[in-house]
């Protein structure tokens, strides 16, 4: 069984790798966290025909985008499934005066930001320090790539 540290490292790596993850926690009847079992699930591996209670709950949680708690499981305990998604990506085409506050706002909202402009004076990291990626290229070339 993986340690909590290993499990959460794997969760973070999955999210950084643009892969959604679902964390399943199984509690005993008393709900004691000390006796909790945790499992990380890749939603891409979940099928509609899955029969394991935890995996069925993980699929529901992933599809709804919300945590799901189920009590009174076959084992008499509780199941809690919580989805984690990579940040949404925002591509800003043009680095003019409107792009700066837009990028700042989007960064505060948790977006992964890419700024594209074919003018080096606008497409630079100094102007957009909050951007994850700054590309100096035409819109057409960038969108084709």
Image (cartoon, rainbow, N blue to C red):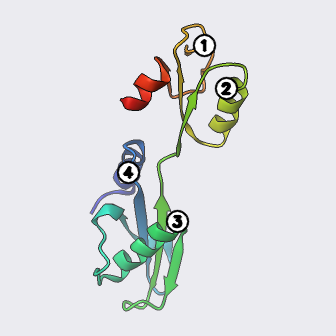
Q: Decide if residue 39 is in sight here.
A: yes
Answer whether labels 2 and 1 touch (C-beta < 8 Å). Answer: yes
Q: Residue at x 37, y 51 (%)?
A: 19
What is the crowding at mark 1: few (fewer than 14 residues within 10 Å), some, or many (at least 20)?
A: many
Q: Residue at x 47, y 91 (%)?
A: 72
CA gap, disc 4 to disc 3? 14 Å
Q: Which residue is mark 4?
A: 19
Q: Position of residue 83 (x, y in %)?
A: 48, 63
CA gap, disc 4 to disc 1? 31 Å
CA gap, disc 2 to disc 3? 30 Å
Residue placed farthest to the top in the image? 121
Q: Residue at x 46, y 69 (%)?
A: 63
> Of callouts 3 and 1, which one flags the residue occurring earlier in the amino acid sequence?
3
Q: Secondary structure at mark 4?
A: loop
Q: Which residue is mark 3?
A: 65
Query: Could you tell me which quadrant the C terminus lies in?
Result: top left
Q: Residue at x 58, y 30 (%)?
A: 92
The quarter of the displayed image where residue 35 is located? bottom left
Residue sitting nearer the eye, 143 or 104: 143
Residue sitting nearer the eye, 70 or 64: 64
Answer whether labels 3 and 1 touch (C-beta < 8 Å). Answer: no
CA gap, disc 3 to disc 1? 37 Å
Between circles 4 and 1, the one closer to the viewer is 1
> Of callouts 4 and 2, which one flags the residue occurring earlier in the amino acid sequence?
4
Q: Which residue is mark 1?
A: 122
> Of callouts 4 and 1, which one flags the residue occurring earlier in the amino acid sequence?
4
Which mark is on residue 99?
A: 2
Q: Position of residue 7 (x, y in %)?
A: 36, 55
Answer whether labels 4 and 3 touch (C-beta < 8 Å). Answer: no
């Amino acid at each position: 069984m993986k340690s909590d540290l290993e499990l959460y490292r794997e969760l973070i790596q999955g999210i950084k790798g643009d892969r959604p993850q679902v964390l399943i926690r199984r509690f005993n009847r008393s709900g004691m966290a000390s006796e909790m079992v945790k499992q990380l699930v890749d939603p891409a591996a979940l099928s509609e025909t899955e029969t394991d209670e935890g995996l069925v709950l993980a699929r529901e949680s992933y599809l709804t985008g919300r945590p799901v708690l189920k009590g009174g499981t076959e084992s008499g305990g509780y199941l809690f499934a919580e989805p984690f998604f990579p940040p949404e990506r925002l591509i800003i085409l043009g680095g003019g005066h409107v792009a700066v506050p837009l990028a700042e706002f989007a960064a505060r909202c948790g977006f992964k930001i890419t700024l594209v402009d074919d003018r080096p004076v606008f497409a630079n990291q100094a102007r957009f320090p909050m951007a994850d990626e700054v590309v100096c290229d035409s819109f057409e070339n960038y969108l084709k790539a």
